[in-house]
Image: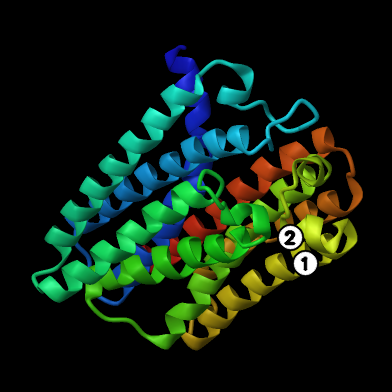
Amino acid sequence: MSVKSWIQAARLRTLPLAVSTMILGHSLAYDSGAFRWSIAILSVLTGICLQVLSNFANDYGDSIHGADHQDRQGPQRAVQSGAISLSQMKFAVNTLAVISLLCGLCLVYVAFDDWLLRGGFTLLGILAIWAAVNYTAGSSPYGYSGKGDIAVFIFFGLVTVIGSYFLQTKSASWDLLLPAFASGTLSVGVLNVNNIRDINSDKIAGKISIPVKIGRKAAVSYHGCLLASAVVALVSYGVIQSFGVSLKWLFMILSPLLIVNFLAVKNKKEAAQLDPYLKQLALTTAGIIILFSFGLVVL
């Protein structure tokens, strides 16, 4: 076991997407006139802990449930390769769960004076920890029955965006559903590329992802709908908020990369060919969200 093995298991490449969705929520709050750095920093720190927890739990869960078998064509996992033992990864999962809870408790204590709100957000944090662990590591992992897309949409869209906004402002409005929807659907798109890449190995392992359920062709169409609807949602928010002719539309310069991703998912059938486009969509999504947030805060 080495530090490098733990860094690889943490999958740091997933952090820009997770962090950017929270930045979006705090930027929306800043745009509405309410922002505290202490809340933003604790929120991002909690989100990072939850993302690493999810990655560790995914490594552990896929190993014990057989998804990381010898025919899997994606990047090799830490437990699968033997770099980290099952017991070591289980200890890391439990440790990160405790750290995530402590960070979350600090966050809600700083953000709220009302004990009812503190209690409500604490329960939400516990649910987020449960979701991070039980995606693949629980006794009945919901990621193995096609429910992962729903969880990603909720936690990378509604919870991170609207939740971050509410932490700052103690309020919410219906128009926030548009950027939250965009964040959620783009994040589901990243998961969908991963699941299309792994469709054959997931079938062998009995992991029933959405692409396994509906087939590759329908999963590609689903992918196109996810990416297109996200752009429509962000544009609609810009129209509602009267962006007008301004640099607030700067995020649109990255939208052609979504088309590139869709065409790659459609045409590249081998896992090794498709793997780079998983990273490409994650970074493109983070870039679009960051530019959108930049427009709200600076322009």
The numbered dot on residue 222 is 1
* SS assignment at label 2: helix
Residue 250 or 24: which is nearer the viewer? 24
Instruction: Name the element at disc 1.
Output: helix
- Nearer to me, 167 or 102: 102
Q: Which mark is residue 210?
A: 2
**Dot 2 and dot 1 residues touching (CB under 8 Å):** yes
- Find residue 153 and report its horizontal and vertical position in percent: 55, 65
Q: Does residue 250 appear anywhere in the picture?
A: no
Q: Is residue 61 left or right of residue 241?
A: right
Which of the two discs, 2 and 1, labels the residue nearer the N terminus?
2
Judge whether 228 appears above or below 257 on screen: below
In this rendering, is residue 281 above or below 156? above
From the viewer's perspective, is 147 left or right of 105?
right
Q: Residue at x 70, y 55 (%)?
A: 192
Q: Residue furthest left?
A: 113
Q: Position of residue 234 (x, y in %)?
A: 56, 74
- Residue 111 % position (x, y): 17, 64
Q: Nearer the viewer, mark 2 or mark 1?
A: 2
Hey, what amino acid is under mark 2?
Answer: Ile
Q: Is residue 56 visible?
A: yes
Residue type (three-letter) at the residue carrying disc 1: Tyr
The residues tagged by marks 2 and 1 sit, at their Cα atoms, a distance apart of 9 Å
Residue for point 50% across, 87% down: 240
Query: What residue is at 33 percent from the left and 43 percent from the top?
Result: 97
